[in-house]
Amino acid sequence: MMWLEVIHVRVTDQECDRLLPIFTDLLKEIREKENCKKVKLFRRALLKNDVCLHLYHDSENAGVEGSPVGLHLATMLKSFGMVNHTVWTEKEQMPSRQGMNENLKEAGER
C-alpha cells in the first residue's frame, strides 16, 4: 500500500534562508539511509517561508503517527517554526478522463 507523510513547516523569513540548506542535507541523508520510496521538497509559490516535505512509502504499516524518520523530522523542525505532520493513505485509482466521460454519458442517459 502506498502512503505519504506530509511535513509542512511555516518559518520566519530569517529562518527560511537558514532552513533550506539544512533541508538539502536532510533529503540527501533520507534518500541514502531511510526506507522511503521517494522524497520531495516543495516551497509554496507565493509564500517563500512555507516549506513542505513529502515522504512516499510503500509498505503495509502506515502508522497513524507516521514513520520514525517522519516523526524525527517533525520534532526537529519545530525549532524553526510551526509544523503540521500528517499521514495520507492511497485509495483506489481515479478513473481516466475517458472513463470519467463514459460514466458521465451513462449517468445522463438514465
Image: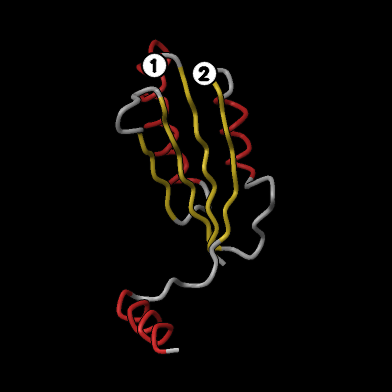
Rendered location of residue 16, percent (x, y): 39, 19
What is the residue that sits farthest to the right in this orientation?
64
**Is mark 2 in CB contact (under 8 Å) with mark 1?**
yes
Instruction: Decide: is 63 above or below 21.
Output: below
Circle 1 packing at 10 Å, graded few (<14), some (14-19), many (20+), is few
Tell me the quadrant of the picture where the C terminus can be found: bottom left
Res. 60 image quadrant = bottom right
Q: Amino acid at mark 2?
A: Phe
Q: Position of residue 9 (x, y in %)?
A: 49, 28
Decide which of 70, 101 is in the foreground and name it.
Answer: 101
The spot of residue 48 in percent (x, y) is 34, 24
Nearest to the observer: residue 54 or residue 46 = 46
Q: Which residue is mark 2?
A: 80
**Mark 2: secondary structure:** loop
Callout 1: SS: helix
1 over 23 or under it: above or below: below
Q: Which residue is mark 1?
A: 18
Residue under the image location 57 percent in, 53 percent down: 88
